[in-house]
Image (cartoon, grey):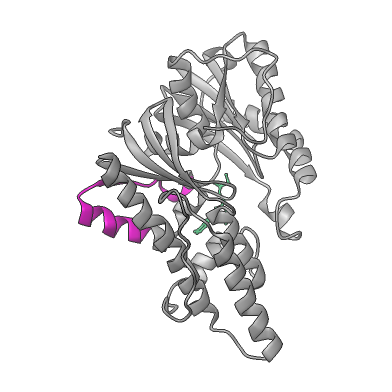
Amino acid sequence: MKILAFESSCDETAVAVVEDGRKILTDQIFSQADLHAVYGGVVPEIASRCHVESISLLTERAIQAAGITRRDIDAVAVTYAPGLIGAVLVGVNFAKSAALALGVPLVPVHHIRGHIAANYLAYPELEPPFLCLAISGGNTLLIDVRGYTDMKIIGATRDDAAGECFDKTARVLGLPYPGGKPIDELSRGGDDNRYSFPIATVDGNPYDMSFSGLKTAVINLVHNAEQKGESIDRAGLAASFTKAVSDSLVPRTMRAAAELGRDAVVVAGGVAANSRIRADFQKAAEQQGVKLYIPPLRLCGDNGAMIGAQGYYEYLAGSRAGSDLNAYATMDI
Ligand code: KG4
């Protein structure tokens, strides 16, 4: 079954064709990151306009690159939540028109479910149940994935997402947006014990997280140094900061896996590209005797293929949308 899939929830316009939920026939991504970099973050109006400008052409290109004709498409899948509302709306409306024009079913997909499904594309043997840590620019969630469409959030950040924390740390260091990759590069070779940063625990739920204190600590450290005319060890700061994020995520995830009796851990989302976090998970999984799945770098960030993968399982579960499908800025998984 071939699914034409759309993703437009933030600053990537992405169109893919995925076969039977596991095989990428094409994965076209147009990143707007350069357009937003000058503002230091995503400007929602610019994102929406850019999606409108690129989605038709990207769709034509995807169908051509997949080596199929429009008649070969069996269903259309689209991210309908969560995300920047104007941006999500562009994908939803385009997908509705495509499904109507092609006479095929329309399948709505939750963006974070898509990030999880990126792992199905990379690992043919992976099947639920497993425990998933989803770490992206807007979300940080611990999810018990009981089935392909049966998931329960067991922990979440109470404030900032891990990715947001990377982006703000990069900004205060004068690094470009999005800041995760530049921080990752800067931290290599840096002393991760150079600065001491807080690792928050949250009363009431050991699986909940908090990153706003860490973000504030980094900002204060840099501003204080600037005011005193002191120089900062930038590589040491990036490494110490990344260690603090990793120490907040990795032990908590492994503990949750042990307590829920899950023998597989899946990491998903843009921050899963971080080299330190990947290495720490690798070590922890080996120690605990748990199977670890992290997508290859190209599938960590937003892409259309992950929506096609999850769309397949949503389709099998009977999920269908009509032309009244709406976009939502927030939605439980
Ligand atoms: O999943 P994603 O592409 O978009 C959302 O759905 O939010 O995640 C984007 C986030 C950004 O905050 C970006 O800075 C972060 O992923 N990111 C990284 C790395 N690469 C991207 N964070 C840490 N280390 C990286 N190597």
Residue drawn at 67 percent across, 30 percent down: 328
**Closer to the camera, 124 or 65?**
124
**Does residue 84 sit above or below 178 in this rendering?**
above
The spot of residue 125 in percent (x, y) is 28, 33
Task: Indicate whether residue 289 is drawn in magenta.
Answer: yes
The spot of residue 267 in percent (x, y) is 40, 46
Query: In the shown orientation, is residue 65 left or right of residue 292?
Result: right
Span colored in magenta: 278-298
Task: Indicate whether residue 88 is drawn in magenta.
Answer: no
- Which image quarter holds the N terminus? top left
**Closer to the camera, 118 or 169?**
169
The spot of residue 150 in percent (x, y) is 41, 26
- Going by the picture, which residue comes out furthest to the front? 204
**Does residue 9 sit above or below 25 in this rendering?**
below
Q: Quadrant of residue 81?
A: top right
The spot of residue 106 in percent (x, y) is 59, 16
Q: Is residue 179 visible?
A: no
- Going by the picture, which residue comes out furthest to the top? 103
Q: Quadrant of residue 59?
A: top right
